[in-house]
Image (cartoon, rainbow, N blue to C red):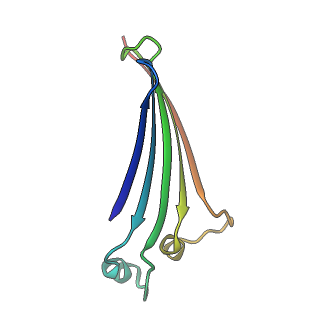
Amino acid sequence: MTATSELSAHCATELHRDGVCVVATLFEASLLQTLRNEGSIPHDIGWDLSTSAIWRPRANQNIVLRLSAAALLPGSGFRDLFDNVNGHRNYYSVLGNVTLSY
């Protein structure tokens, strides 16, 4: 089960920005406990925070540039399921893409 909050802003016809906050929680962990052969798994998976920007220079679909970034702030359930060998507390990702069509 997750709870989601989203903020979206259209600054102009050419620029669109989004922000999303997701809280991930396990309500029933018995299947996961059986599959992982673990006694107990905390229900708190963590917070998933992301933002993105889409730019269409000519306000059409011929050129579309997108940049997005996300961060996972792990909860006790995530840390119980996955080891962290590097000692980093949070997980980050950045993605960019360009679509050109004619």
Residue depicted at 46% across the width and 68% down the height? 45
* For residue 102, side relative to residue 71 (left or right): left
Q: Nearer the viewer, residue 41 or 17?
A: 17
Query: In the depicted view, which residue is nearer to us: 38 or 8?
Result: 8
- Residue 36: image quadrant is bottom left
Please report the residue visible at 52 percent of the width from the left and 74 percent of the height from the top.
Answer: 76
Q: Is residue 12 left or right of residue 1?
A: right
Count the marks: how many? Answer: 0
The picture places residue 50, in percent across and down from the top left corner, at 49, 46
Name the image quarter holding residue 79. Answer: bottom right
Residue 94 locus on image (x, y percent): 56, 42
Residue depicted at 45% across the width and 52% down the height: 21
In the rendered structure, the answer to whether residue 2 lies left or right of residue 17 reads left
Q: Is residue 13 positioned above or below 23 on the image?
A: above
The residue lying toward the viewer, choosing from 79 and 16, is 16
Q: Measured along the vertical axis of the image, is residue 15 above or below residue 86?
A: above
Residue depicted at 36% across the width and 59% down the height: 3
Q: Quadrant of the N terminus?
A: bottom left
Residue most extreme to the right = 87
